[in-house]
Image: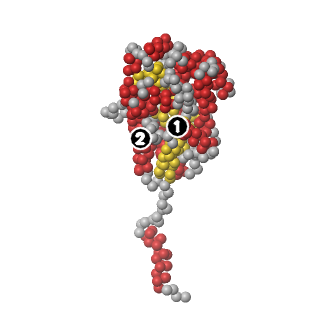
Amino acid sequence: MRLNKTVAILLGVLLLAPALLIAGGGQQAAPEQREIVLNWPTIWVGQDAKATVVEQLVNEFNQANAGQIRINMQPSPDYDGYRDLINTSIAAGQVPDLFVFNVDPTQFQYYDGDLLMDFTDDLKGPWGNRFVDGAIQASTRNGRVKSVPFESALTPIWYNTALFERAGISQFPTTNAGFWEAAEKLKAAGIVPMSHMTGGTNAWTSMLWYSHIVANIGGPDVWSKPLSDPVFVQAAEILLRMYQDGNTTRDAVGADAGVSGGHYQAQNTAMFINGPWYIGNIRTNSPEAYANTRLAAFPGPGNYQGGQIGFLLSNLAAANTNDPARRAAVIKFMQWMTEPANVARLSLDSGALFTIRFDIPPGTEVDPLQQMFLEINSSATFIAEHFQANFPADVVAEFGQALGSMALGRSTPQQFIAQIRAAAGQ
């Protein structure tokens, strides 16, 4: 059978095409590389002090990896809501591609099984050398590291020098008696001494005050003691006093972190507790309170003076995957976020502290309050963890409930501890 001339020509071209490519020194075009999209629900958006630089870093990473990797940020600015979102998702086996791992006993339960990506071997190389001593160990359970250490915390006593001076107090007290004398002078001058709160999921401000008191009496290893130890009732008695006789605001019972911090920013209270991540917030929203703030250790009645409350605050984590390309994309982004130069930008802009070593670029003007954090961190006689780092979420939530009851006079310090012990199964 004779072929139509046009058909014959077309067949010849098709048959010769591969040979022509090879003869011409070329190769067949590889399949177009798929873009790996990693969804990242994150709290570091909106009013969070780290939001601006985090967004910049993500945008820069996306531009540098255009067509290959894209980080899709999913804003979740409510901290309590974010924790619930992550816990619910992981419990259902639907782990986000990337997420902020809240470092507490409840979260570490998710190390069990194969839901989270394992970074143990990756961090044994040069990447692991970026981190401060102890950070990787603190993120390790049963020999495995399934979240990358990132943000750390120190939560000293913040105090307003202008309010202290108005009350005739020249410096922060260094003894327990001096602390309560200062409180009386502040009240006499019409100033509420302390910010407190029983609300939220963890009664944050008051939980930190309590942690300072406990560590001051019981020392850096106090959390290794059972809650039946007398130190915890003794600390509860002091915490109760902080709620009595006008030592805190009238709305402290039921107040959340916004109310507690708002009173300090409005200079309604003279003392407050929070971490370095709060620097950007107060600097932007209350410049006067920011300028008047100094930091101190709690001068309690115990024998362990000069200590601070510090802890790993948040790590970076990811869903496990069997896809090598997807895993490589996650590692690349994690390494980008923990690059010392990037962490320096994030820290210097927000005031937050991190577990990654970095050098401050020459000529960089360091935020004065952040400099105070660095100095008080280095001068601390010890650093102990807070209550929340040592108990599951349901026990932490019970702390606020028990505190509200005690503050309203419905229970005693002994009953306060008994309620927490029951929740903790002690």
- Residue 242, compared with residue 395, is above or below; it is above
Q: Position of residue 220 (x, y in %)?
A: 54, 21
Q: Would you call the spot at circle 1 few (<14 residues within 10 Å), some (14-19), or many (20 or more)?
A: some
**The C terminus appears in which quarter of the rendering?**
top right
In the rendered image, which residue does mark 1 sit on?
79
Q: In this view, does 400 lie above or below 66?
A: above
Q: Is residue 330 left or right of residue 25?
A: right
**Mark 2 burial class by Cα count in 10 Å: few <14, some 14-19, many 20+:** some
Taking the spot 54% from the left edge, 14% from the top edge, the residue there is: 302
Residue under the image location 55 percent in, 32 percent down:
200
**In front: 301, or 365?**
301
- 146 or 155, which lies in front? 155
Q: Mark 2 or 1, which is nearer the eye?
A: 1
Amino acid type indicated by mark 2: Thr
Q: Are marks 2 and 1 in contact (CB under 8 Å)?
A: no
Q: Is residue 381 visible?
A: no
In the picture as drawn, the residue positioned furthest to the left comes out as 363
Q: Element under label 2? A: helix
**Marks 2/1: CA distance?**
17 Å
- Answer with left or right where residue 81 lies relative to residue 340: right
Q: Where is residue 277 in the image (x, y as percent from the top left)?
A: 45, 32
Q: What residue type is labelled 1?
A: Tyr
Q: Quadrant of residue 422?
A: top right
Which of the 4 quarters of the picture holds residue 318? top right
Residue annotated with mark 2: 52
First in sequence: mark 2 or mark 1? Answer: 2
**Residue at (55%, 26%) from the top-left corner?**
253
Q: What element carries label 1?
A: helix
Residue 165: x %, y % from top left: 38, 17
Percent position of residue 52, x then y: 41, 41
Quarter residue 173 falls in: top left
Q: Which of 284 and 341 is in front in this view?
A: 284
